[in-house]
Amino acid sequence: MHQERAILVSVLIFLIFRFCTCIDTITLTRPLKDGDILVSNGETFALGFFSPANSSNRYVGIWYNKVSEQTVVWVANRDRPITNSSGILSIDETGNLVLHEKDQSFVFWSTNVSRVVNDVFSAQLLDSGNLVLFQGLVNKEVYSWQSFDHPSNTLLPGMKFGLDRKTGLNRVVTSWKSSGDPGVGDYSYKMEFVGPTQLFLYKGMTRIWRTGSWTGHGWSGVPAMTQNFIFNVTYINNNDEVAVVYLIRNSSILSRLTVNESGTVERLTWHGPDKRWIGFWSAPKEQCDAYNHCGPFGFCDPYKSGTFECDCLPGYEPQSPQDWYLRDGSKGCKRKAGTQMCEIGDGFVELARAKVPDTSTARVNMSLGLEACKELCLRNCTCMGYASADISKGAAEGGCITWYGNMIDARTFPDGGQSFYTRVDATELAKYSSQRLKKSHNNRFLVIGVPIIAAGFFFLCAFICYYIWKIRGKLNEGKARFNFMNSLKSSEGCLTDKDIGENVDIHVFDFSKILVATDNFSPSNKVGEGGFGSVYKGKLLNGQEIAVKRLSQSSGQGMQEFKNEVTLIAKLQHRNLVRLLGYCFRKEEKMLVYEYLPNKGLDSFIFDQEKASLLDWKKRLQIIQGIVRGLLYLHHDSRLKIIHRDLKASNVLLDTNLNPKISDFGMAKIFGGEEDEAKTRRVVGTYGYMSPEYAMEGLFSVKSDVFSFGILLLEMISGRKNNSYYKDNSVNLIGHVWDLWKQDKALMVVDSSLGDSYDAHEVLLCIHIGILCVQELASDRPTMTDVAFMLSNRETMLPPPNQPAFIFRQLKYGMDSKSASASGGDGSVFDDTITILHPR
């Protein structure tokens, strides 16, 4: 009796243990059918059949078991989906994992390893996320096949990423085709071994991003990989393999590195409380990340203040100054004229905190220290630069990398990277040595000289204050006398420097000269009319043609707007901004004198059926790029950040060669310091171009101009005004374009005057950018820097747009389009503006 009870207890314990232990193994007698799930021993990962979003196809994959958002990290049959639920993953008689349907008529996927003489086979899902195949039960440390050797779009902690020199296997991570298709996509992330080891992100056969070489601490182009990185990164380079392995320091953290279908390498970590994946790091994410962005012998610095991010290495100059000026650095740099290389006096200039150039044309010698590396490079006339191969070992033992031929894809970081030394001749070396000496003297002056000068300045200020106090009475008396005499003068004249602002170098015109130039403001000389008055063509006595903007007394543009326009345009110098020649003031009348642009406003071309044909697609694209450069200067490159607030077709003037110039800065706003956004109760702008947050809440920022640019861009492509009537019941141009975009018919919006003579790819790119610019939320819109990058890097994958803003409906404010805008006609250079619209 006791013996029977003991047997019963043993059976019950066995059954409890069996049903409480996760099944993580496939055997010859226990396959995995569609609907079954294999769970790793620690319950971290699961293996089974799944269907991606918006798809009924079935795939075998591995995903996180305890993550609420299904996250697939590996797929077996990526390009051969099963179209029904009859799939089976089993081990066949050859010892291979095989995916097939019930009738076994077709094999969708197989491990395809050579058979080993052994009749005991099994496959196990490990808690690392690795699916391994055994041939035999004796030694389970040796796998005949493992999923870690065949990654999909994800690198997991513990995976070796790189080359197995014994078998020739190079592990490559490839993106999905789309979120609903795990097939092999356009983007691949792999290790390359020509020269020192590097990782590259490819789109097809084109390199789009590079990590830089291994520094001992991490990749030179990934400064986030520091000593305090959350991973323990191991780099292996021996006779058997070249690989990198990421191991998580805290096993409770779930983290993965993926190559997504939009062309980005991302490091993501799971945040349990929020139940979502949080981006920890990604690349490429800025202009300087784009491979070879600044061309041969160029280097990229995205943190330069107010200038083009590309620069030339010391001793070099732009290959094409014109392209460089247009912010296109792709042709790179060349040696400066008159450079004498490989002569006595050659030396090297250090570029600190650098992602070193592409090492594909470099050589490495680990037996040399940094000083020996310098001597080696100096003796070889074809050596262009050098750096330490492993900065973790110090300058004496860090090895040597030397570059030959073109040096490309170098950049700088505010932190991280390493020192790179580029070769220069004696003249250039002397110049940089002088600059370093001057900097050293400046630092010494700051430490010693500044305190002495500060003390002297304090005593000088005390003396001046005493002197001012003594003569204060006399100054007040003189000021009163001046005001009295000034009041006796004629009210005709010009604003004083005090009215306009100091340090503004601008001509003051006599009213009499303006009358002569415009033939007493003859109607025949009127070239346009808008909400702020009229514009007249004139000719000065010296023959120079001018345009006089005569502000009407009833306009909303008062003294503040007048001061704005004078002070702003006088200080702004850019080829795509209109040039202000001077101003004049007579009683209550204010006049601005501009350079005369014979082709008037952009609106007089694109909204005119006859003149629109004069702007072919190539010219329209050039005008678009010119407007982008002008806005980029206002938002980023000028001394102060300037928001235009009234960008529209009539405020873009065209010169003799149809080059665009942004005009009318009466509504512009200056931002200083770190200010990015402001709020006003006096909303000004033009109906049809104002962003929703500005029109409704009075909030404006650079993104307000971006919205207006998006409208203008779509108008240039379509030849139609935003507030035109559309037969498809769209409320405006934005709605019309959006409807066509969703139907993949966006090219139907193209201006009929262009015919078929346009580049469809370029037009679709511009439409895409235009929709991104008019998205409802300001935070979703790109900056003008982003827009310039998108236009100049046409292979870059753009993000999908969110629904744009449809705020300009005919009855939105209780008015129709006619009451909202009383334009002077399609040929005018100004549209009427909303001058005072108090937000709710």
Image: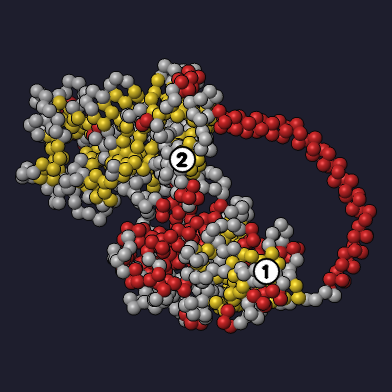
* Residue 213 position within the rendered picture, expressed as x and y whole percent measured from the top left: 40, 30
For numbered disc 1, what is the local secondary structure?
Answer: strand
Between marks 2 and 1, how big is the CA–CA gap? 43 Å
Number of residues whose C-alpha sits closer than 10 Å to that of mark 2, classed few (under 14), some (14–19) or many (20 or more): many
On-image quarter of the N terminus: top left
Foreground residue, 12 or 448? 448
For numbered disc 2, what is the local secondary structure?
Answer: strand
Residue depicted at 68% across the width and 62% down the height:
506
Looking at the picture, the colour scheme in use is: secondary structure
Residue depicted at 51% across the width and 38% down the height:
337
On-image quarter of the C terminus: bottom right
The kind of residue tagged 1 is Tyr
> Toward which corner of the image does residue 540 lie, by quadrant?
bottom right
Q: Is residue 112 above or below residue 703?
A: above
Q: Is residue 233 above or below residue 578?
A: above
* Residue 124 position within the rendered picture, expressed as x and y whole percent measured from the top left: 21, 32
Asked whether residue 675 is in view, the answer is no
* Residue 414 position within the rendered picture, expressed as x and y whole percent measured from the top left: 53, 38
Asked whether residue 116 is in view, the answer is yes
Tag of residue 553: none
Q: Write down the residue under mark 2.
A: 333
The kind of residue tagged 2 is Cys
Q: Is residue 14 left or right of residue 599?
A: left
CB-based contact (under 8 Å), mark 2 and mark 1: no
Q: Is residue 242 above or below residue 714?
A: above
Q: Is residue 412 left or right of residue 243?
A: right
Q: Write down the residue under mark 1.
A: 583
Q: Is residue 557 left or right of residue 175?
A: right
Q: Earlier in the sequence, mark 2 or mark 1?
A: 2
